Amino acid sequence: MRGLLSSKAAVPWLFLGPVVVFAAVFFVLPVVFAAYVSLTTWDSLTPPRWVGLANYQYLFATDPIFLRTLWQTVYFALGTLALGVPLALGLATVFGRSRHQGAWRVLYTLPMVTNIVAIGFIFWFVFRQTDGLLNRLLGLFGLPGPGWLTDPSLAMLSAILVFVWMELGRNMLLFAAGLASIDESYYEAARLDGAGRWQLFRFVTLPLLKPTVLFVIVTGFISGMSYFTLMLVLFPGTQGGPGRAALTTGQYMYQMAFEDLRMGRASAVSYVLFALVLVATLVQLRLLRRGGVEARG
Amino acid sequence: MTETSLPATAPGLAAMAETMPPGRPRSAARRTAWTALKYALLTLGALIMVLPFLDMILGALRTPAERLARPPVYWPRDPQWGNFVRVFEELPLWRWMANSLGVTLAITALQLLTSAMAGYALAKFRFPGRTGMFRFAVGAQMFPFFIFLIPWFFILRYAPLMGGNDWTGQGGFGLLGSYAALVLPFAVSWYGIFLMRQFFLAVPDELLDAARMDGAGEFFIFFRIALPLVGGGLATLAIFVFLYHWNEVLWTMTVTRTAPDLQTLPVGIYLLRGAFEQEATKSLQQAAILVSVLPIIVLFLALQRFYVTGITSGSVKG
Amino acid sequence: MARGIAGLGGACLALMGGAGAAQEARTIQVATHYTPEQAAPLEACFDAFEAANPGVTVEHQQTAYGDFLQTILTSRVGGTSPDIYNVYSVWVPQLASAGVLEPPPADIAEFVAANYAPATQGAVTIGGQLWGIPTELSVYALVYNKALLAEAGYTEPPKTWAELREIAQKITRVNDQGNIDVGGYAYGTTVAEGVHPFYAQMFAAGVPPFAEDGRSTNLTSPEAVRILSDQAALFADGITGNEIVVDNFVSNAVGMQIAANWNKFGYQEAYGEAFADTVGVAPIPTDGPGGTMLYSFLWTVDAASDVKDDAWALLRFLSEPREGGLSCTGEAMAAMGAFAGSDADLAAMTATADDFDRAFIAEVTEGRAVTQPNVWQASEVDRILRGYIDQAWSGGMAPADALAAADAEIQAILSEQP
């Protein structure tokens, strides 16, 4: 042992050892395994049958619903961002200037520490059509009470609303930290130039906050694209919401794999989804880097 | 992807409030209007955040008759506080909590150790393969979880010489149905390695070299000198990892379907759907869910400050 | 876990060549979707079996019904499967083809042939091969709320769909928000709550949803299109809606629905004394020859079980008629308001049946109930069909288009069958 340690070249590898072993077993092997399985037909009980690219071909040429789930997934991911990011940013801006912000913070970040299953259940009750909290409140104002979870045209929107609600606190904290790191001198200078409240936000806050905004968007997009635990709880027993309107690609893959025992096809789905997320992430990271440079320059 | 974009610790909200521009008023009237509007919005938002929880509490307190009444009764007339006790009798809530705590702590400890060791190696040694390993850790972060879902299942299933398997992985059930199945796949966090590397970069080499001069062993240097210097980073990572895995559902559900003894809190309450699905018993379902979220909310209130710091500094990984 | 240890122990003993020693302690794991309360009569029988067979331990494992197939499959893949499953008959083709199920030994086959009606045997037989012992028999019929029908001025349940529609329309009440408070007719949100009534209506119309050999569908038949169009019309005309579901029946909020007999338990719990005066059962309204759907659960043994002989012995023990008339299985079924499949059990149950049960049993004994075809990948097929039924209900697709799309998708799956 002593000899090994004193051999300089080996030392870093001793520290890296556990990680290298892990990477081989739980990263490289799975990635290769999934790639292989995606080229086979395999019900996991009988031996796999090599089918080449047939699974991928099936997904794009034959599968009547795969592309729809992709679209629904993108809709979910982008929808949560389009709604959640401006909301969190606005709140963070207002927050920064309010007293008692500790108390506010607790309220807004409560969902962050509540597990997703509980949140799903909570909103399953809130969204109930005839006696749920939301429709009761709408009823007070004489508004109609739609079927948030049972109307195919609303199902995904409802999931988006819950996700935004859930992530609001976290995003708000991120933006607040970003705001805190903006040097006061920028504002001083802008005010000397006669900038108003909106102009300060538009021309000082927003550009300087760009790295944080992009970070929230990139991570939000990645998690949104592979998300479906929430849908499992919100739409119980329906396997993807009314008319499969809330079926995301992730859940579709899970159904294929663990319900229909189509491991090959499911692995192909996971690779397609991965490719999509990867491309989108790389594009966003490019923007992120550029945003970072701008912010510092 | 350079380390310059990572502040060692991001300022918490408290610090932020002090550094924020005070918002110079144009006129007293306008300021009052703005403040009123601001608080109105904040209050409205806070209500939206809290009402669903309150709705859940009211639901848990209703009697079966109130639930079945048409139209259903909203305000419980005879609050069933006993429901919160009954769920402990009818459901293995303690077991779920213990499992959640054990599994999450084990994952957190493992990730801290592996992240710190690997991050230390990448930050403090120059060796062939260093850049490659670093790039690997960064790139690996881009692989989403769902790619691993199926392979992990089978790797654990066919783990040689484990759980009754022979050396070819046949005969038994491998590591499925054991706590190892819940913990091992999450033993390493690529993000954690990346994060810890950033923190170790700030540790001066001179300090380590001086210890080497004194004849200290490498592990001694790591555990006794380097590690204590990155306590802030470890705490950040710990909070981050703990919360993430405390709420993990999908993997745990997949591997514990036939091992109810291993189910964690979120998985247990997910499967509640089958337990109290009749409308008349839904109050119990709601009570159980509330009970399940309570401990972590209390913990959160106690550790709020650390937690906020963890989330915000954990974010800056570009 | 216990089985894991037992399995490990068994493997070690086998390695040592101590085959006799493996007789020592054997554990039979029984997986059902019954709650501990529902399974209580079974548990009592397990104890009796344990007493009669020293060294054998029987453990009951409850699995949520919604996840049951998934549980079997994942546990099977994971090698942690129980020894006995109580499975839904439509899962059998998939489970059997994957080698999950152990074909019953000759004595069990004889037992089933001698003690169960042909229709019931049909539910647990695929392509001539018997796969287990029938347990829970479920039948669909029109369940209606007598009080709501009376309020609307009707004393008799509808015989045709047109009558059903007329009555339902009179019952439906809408609240200030435009949501249905009391619905004349209701469906449910789960896959089965949409698909099973549809299948039952098809059988009633005289056209089974699938061809006899299970390799093609009749979903594009005029009858199927008409049934779905009529259903969609109930939604379009505000007679039913997503806001009113079969679960609301216990709140006096649903006039009629197509439901299975096992719901009795919930109805009784909700209505108590008023149950008999409130809940009525009638054949499924139709313009066709009439009929309905029946499905069965069956006791099966895992092909990988290391205690197969004990498992079959236990199952036979559970299924044999006892002094009081009911078998163990029958007693458990009766306690939860369900039917057991054996002739003796059905006879014993009919003797003590109330109007509710008698109406359902009549569907079986009068030959109206037809076995749900055990098609390939049934859960996937049902899921797909439910998706398109939703589309038709919500007006997103014309019923004929929805069924054509469903047919194409399902046809592709059925043709995969080996």
Image: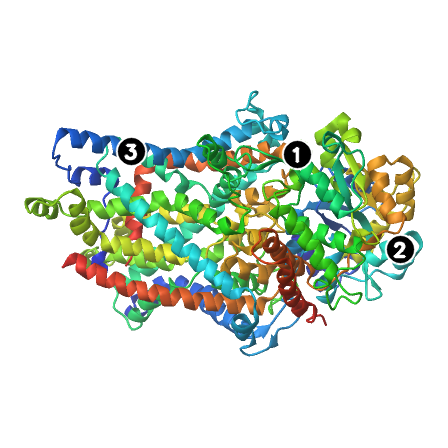
State the colouring used for the structure image.
Answer: rainbow
Q: CA distance from mark 2 to mark 3?
A: 70 Å
Q: Amino acid at mark 3?
A: Gly
Q: Residue C253, which numbered label? A: 1
Name the residue carrying label 2: C112
Q: Is residue C272 left or right of residue B277?
A: right
User: What kind of element bears circle 1?
Assistant: loop
| Residue extending furthest toward the top | B78
User: What kind of element bears circle 2?
Assistant: helix
Residue closer to the observer: A44 or C218: C218
- Chain where mark 3 sits: A
Whether residue C375 is visible to the viewer of this picture, yes or no, is yes
User: What kind of element bears circle 3?
Assistant: helix
- Chain where mark 2 sits: C
Image-quadrant location for residue C9: bottom right
Q: Is residue A178 left or right of residue C142?
A: left
| Residue extending furthest toward the left | A192
Are there few (<14), some (14-19), or many (20+) residues within 10 Å of tag 1?
many
Q: Are marks 2 and 1 in contact (CB under 8 Å)?
A: no
Are there few (<14), some (14-19), or many (20+) residues within 10 Å of tag 3?
some
B174 shown above or below A7 = above
Residue closer to the observer: A34 or A265: A265
Q: Are marks 2 and 1 on the same chain?
A: yes
Q: Amino acid at mark 2?
A: Val
Q: Nearer the viewer, mark 2 or mark 1?
A: 1
Q: Residue at x 68, y 36 (%)?
A: C170
Q: Residue A102, which numbered label? A: 3
Q: CA distance from mark 3 to mark 1?
A: 46 Å
